[in-house]
Amino acid sequence: MLPSISRFARLSTALAVLALPLAAPAQTPDYRVPTSEPKTTSIVMDANTGEVLFSERSDSPRYPASVTKVMTFYLAFEALAAGRLHLDDQVVVSPLAAAQPPTKLGLRAGETISVRDALNGMAVHSANDMAVAISEKIGGSESRFADMMTLKAHQLGMENTRYVNANGLPDNRQVSSAHDIAILTRALLHDYPQYYGFFSQKDFTYRGKTMVNTNHLLGKMPGVDGVKTGFTNAAGFNLDASAVRNGHRLIAVVMGSSSGTVRNANVEGLLLTGFDIEDRRDRGEKIPVTQALFERPVPNAPGARLYRAEQSHDGDPIDVVLAHNNAPKAPSHVSQAGRDWWVQVGQFHSREAAQLRIALVSRRFSKVFDDAEGQVGGRKRIYVARFTGMDQHAAREACSAVRSHGMSCIAGARRV
């Protein structure tokens, strides 16, 4: 459980916010985004306990892009819960809000919109104009609201975060980190679960125009129900996602990916492996805190076969173990008669996600896939994860084991 904020602390916060425009801090922390390391950072956190299951450069500052809006939502939810704001209140669109570049709802200066519709536009369409309009409604001005955002970030323990605007449009002074975003998301889930449904909507219709959620994992990866995407040229492709399975809720944040496809695949793989760790713990396995999800095998280990899964064009590749047999592979002259069956354990929109599924299945069901070889094949952006070199009995036994854990699996024989 996250600690609750006392009335005294809330009063202190309010007084601090009132004082924000009067003076700047004497010393400003160094929030510069490093250029000497790979751009991609990531983290997987247990939303219930706050335990970090995996972290890769997650405390290194990065540009948050539209993931910034998660803090804008947090302060809006705080105002709603306190009664200072209501979903049916009307928000007047200022000239500054109307002038924001796309994506936006496109209201003209002087027009009004309900708080509910403004938040829907932010959650589904990542509307930049609505983020500014909400910030002005709550803070009086966007700059003062940005000060409130930074203050709240530091109260929550977000040590590498500073905000200067409400929507995440490019500004090299505005930075955060994957770890900080995970901390914020966990706080939002805990403090304002009654409003979390804004992030779960697959679409939103306003003035006859239907907009589709920018988080494409919604409806595609079971369990994913939020929260926010982001992209700028400087930031790369970011995604803050949360998913729930078997009583466990995880938060995964990836920042700086080279494309939306790579970003989504990385988040999907991190969540899949995170849930695998949680399931294994539920079965009594003792897995250390922050154990690497992608374990590098000992060089030249017998039978180890690897794929290299690039996280981004400028990021470090990750070695993913697809199969790790203690017995050496049979020489080519040894008969493989009867071992012409394959087992397919999923179809994906990226090669990376298929590789990660093979890694997960080969580890989780090592007994039934001991002699099989993991392979990824595909075309037209559909990639299949398969194990080959099995006989009929082994293939059917393996599929039965995989299906018993609620995962898809089909078996078949290679045509000769």
Image (cartoon, grey):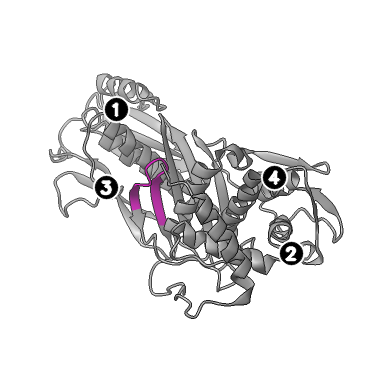
* Kind of residue at badge 4: Asn
Residue 300 lies, with reference to residue 159, above or below; the image says: above
Magenta-tinted stretch: 42-54
The percent position of residue 181, horizontal first and vertical second, equals 48, 55
At horizontal 42% and vertical 57% (from top left) the residue drawn is 179
Q: CA distance from mark 3 to mark 1?
A: 40 Å
User: Callout 2 environment at 10 Å: few (<14), some (14 to 19), or many (20+)?
Assistant: some
* Circle on res. 340: 1
From the viewer's side, name the closer residue of 337 and 68. 68
Which residue is the site of mark 4? 120
* Kind of residue at badge 2: Gln
Which residue is the site of mark 2? 100
Query: Which label sits in the foreground, 1 or 2?
Result: 2
Quarter holding the N terminus is top left
* Kind of residue at badge 3: Val
Which residue is the site of mark 3? 289
Tell me the chief SS of the magenta region.
strand
Considering every residue shown, the one lying at the far bottom of the view is 26
At horizontal 72% and vertical 55% (from top left) the residue drawn is 130
